[in-house]
Image (cartoon, grey):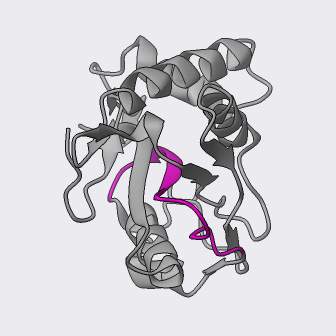
């Protein structure tokens, strides 16, 4: 599938466990695995990390840039920073590194850092705009040297504001020679 401007690629749907304080009847096994993915103390955490690594590996094999599979191109994978300053999701980092290990031209490098904590959209009902993210995240390493693709990985896309802001930041830092690919493991649907 070819890239479109600021398209966010995903591997599937996330149905929150609760909506407006009530159990969501659409919450499925994959959505529950995402909750385990986010919780390192969960008994299913390792299973969840493995599951989402495999999902991502399958999805990136379908992505093409001008009829060339992106798995054949030089690519840096970075993860979206946590809502807390100077923190990353260890599970997301693990998925990113595992995927990079499958392709000789791919590497993991953390190019984004959140310097200011923002409310968690999941736990604190934080409403975050693209501007909030642009003002709290910075590019700390320019990923464009010798790379055709920069893939920005997040766990769940709900509004898309985090990935949109990260896309803007990396695209501005990288210049026009680099293609920035926003990628979420799952996308929230209600």
Where residue 62 appears, as percent x and y from the top left, is: 30, 28
Q: Nearer the viewer, residue 132 or 138?
A: 138
Residue stretch in magenta: 141-159
Where residue 181 appears, as percent x and y from the top left, is: 39, 55
Image point (32%, 59%), residue name: 159
- Whether residue 122 is visible to the viewer of this picture, yes or no, is no
Image point (43%, 12%), residue name: 29
Image point (41%, 62%), residue name: 180
Q: Nearer the viewer, residue 166 or 131?
A: 166
Q: Nearer the viewer, residue 8 or 125?
A: 8
* Magenta stretch holds residue 152: yes
* Magenta stretch holds residue 190: no
- Residue 183 falls left or right of residue 74: left
Is 149 above or below relative to 175? above
Is 17 above or below relative to 118? above
| Count of all numbered marks drawn on residues in the image | 0
Where residue 102 appears, as percent x and y from the top left, is: 61, 25
- Whether residue 54 is visible to the viewer of this picture, yes or no, is yes
- Residue 1: which quarter of the image? top left
- Residue 10: which quarter of the image? top left
Image point (32%, 26%), residue name: 24
- Residue 83: which quarter of the image? bottom right
- Residue 190 falls left or right of residue 35: left
Where residue 59 appears, as percent x and y from the top left, is: 37, 27
Quarter of the C terminus within the rendering: top left
């Amino acid at each position: 599938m070819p890239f479109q401007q600021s398209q966010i690629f995903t591997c599937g749907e996330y149905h929150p466990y609760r909506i407006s304080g009530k159990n969501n009847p659409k919450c499925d096994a994959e959505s529950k695995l995402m909750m385990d993915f986010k919780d390192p103390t969960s008994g299913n955490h390792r299973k969840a990390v493995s599951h989402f690594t495999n999902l991502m590996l399958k999805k990136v094999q379908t992505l093409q840039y001008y009829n060339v599979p992106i798995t054949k191109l030089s690519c840096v994978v970075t993860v979206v920073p946590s809502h807390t300053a100077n923190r990353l999701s260890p599970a997301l980092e693990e998925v990113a590194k595992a995927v990079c290990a499958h392709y000789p031209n791919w590497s993991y490098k953390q190019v984004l850092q959140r310097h200011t904590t923002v409310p968690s959209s999941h736990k604190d009902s934080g409403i975050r705009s693209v501007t909030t993210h642009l003002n709290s995240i910075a590019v700390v390493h320019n990923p464009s040297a010798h790379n055709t693709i920069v893939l920005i990985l997040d766990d769940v896309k709900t509004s898309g504001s985090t990935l949109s802001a990260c896309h803007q930041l990396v695209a501005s830092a990288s210049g026009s020679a680099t293609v920035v690919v926003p990628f979420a493991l799952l996308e929230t649907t209600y």
